[in-house]
Image (cartoon, rainbow, N blue to C red):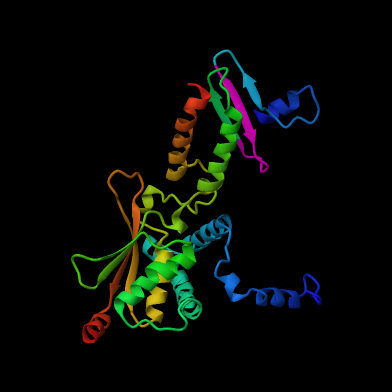
Amino acid sequence: MADAPKKGTLRAAYRRAADIKPRDARTWQVSLNAFAFLFSEMVQYNQTRVDNIAELEHRLEHAGYGVGLRMLELLCHREKGNRREVRLLGILSFVHSTLWKSLFGKVADSLEKGTENEDEYMISEKELLVNRFISVPKDMGAFNCGAYVAGIVKGVLDGSGFPARVTAHFVPVEGQPRPRTTILIKFSEEVLQREARLS
Amino acid sequence: MHAISQQLSPTLGCYGIELLEADTFDLRCFQALTGTKFFVVAEPGTQGLDSLLKNVYGLYVDYVLKNPFYEVEMPIRCELFDLSLTQLIRKDKGVIGR
């Protein structure tokens, strides 16, 4: 740049952020280690401020919720040309492929419909990226830091008009020492009614 | 043990114990930049202990330090760390010998 501002000035910071072109932003990568440390600190920070595990999960979900809302706006603009999803399968495949691809660099391992209930869908992953380095101690029971990812999904769904309850669960797999993680999405009544009307 | 050897050392600029060879065992030490020390006790004459310790340090950084449920200086009880440690030892068994 001919007139590059001096390093360290506020103008320099603004200029650098604006320099990121959209085509670069699509493939922008962040260090996994940096994220792992930041996420670990976030979990520890919340741990000191809660009394029980359910509250900790709730806080992580809340943290992810804001990310989900913003990711929805960003991805709709960047990837889909501002098209809005109105069908259930449409938004689910958006979460399963586009959202996962831009967050974790790959599409989710599987997307399934719940067998027992009409309103349940499951996105499964062999090992969530956020859980890669985390070993939950036995005395914390079924706590899953994937609650953060569940929060992201909830943010995306709520923001696009498909309110749902989203939770993260460990599901043991035969023959594997580590359980896989399932994000369980339970849509609310109005979503199913609307879907029935549209079909 | 590190402090003792540092004081006993005949040469200047000694960081502490690095290798201790005895009749029935070999003890090797790896010291990280932060001062954390890793020890391995093996049968005498075992090769590749140095690189083993470096790999263990890599595993420690990954699975212990990035674990939000681990408090520094406490005994390590991380499942992933134990799993990958046993995998590493099993894999290197062929290289190390026994």
Residue extending farthest to the left is A116
Quick check: A88 left or right of B98?
left
Task: Residue A197 in the image: state x and y as whole percent.
Answer: 22, 87
Residue A148 sits in quarter: bottom left
Seen from the viewer's position, the closer of residues B11 and A126 is: A126
What's the residue at 42%, 65% (across, down)? A149
Quick check: B26 left or right of A188?
right
Decide: is A17 above or below B38. Answer: below
Decide: is B60 above or below A118. Answer: above
**Figure disc tally:** 0
Task: Residue A178 in the image: state x and y as whole percent.
Answer: 36, 47
What's the residue at 48%, 26% (across, down)? B94
Seen from the viewer's position, the closer of residues B89 and A141 is: B89
Decide: is B5 above or below A79. Answer: above
Task: Name the image quarter holding the C terminus of chain A.
Answer: bottom left
Can you see residue B78?
no
Decide: is A113 above or below B71. Answer: below
Task: Name the image quarter holding the N terminus of chain A.
Answer: bottom right
Seen from the viewer's position, the closer of residues B83 and B24 is: B83
Please check the rendered image and state whether residue B66 is part of the magenta-colored stretch, yes or no: no
Task: Residue A86 in the image: state x and y as whole percent.
Answer: 33, 83
Bounds of the magenta segment: B25-37
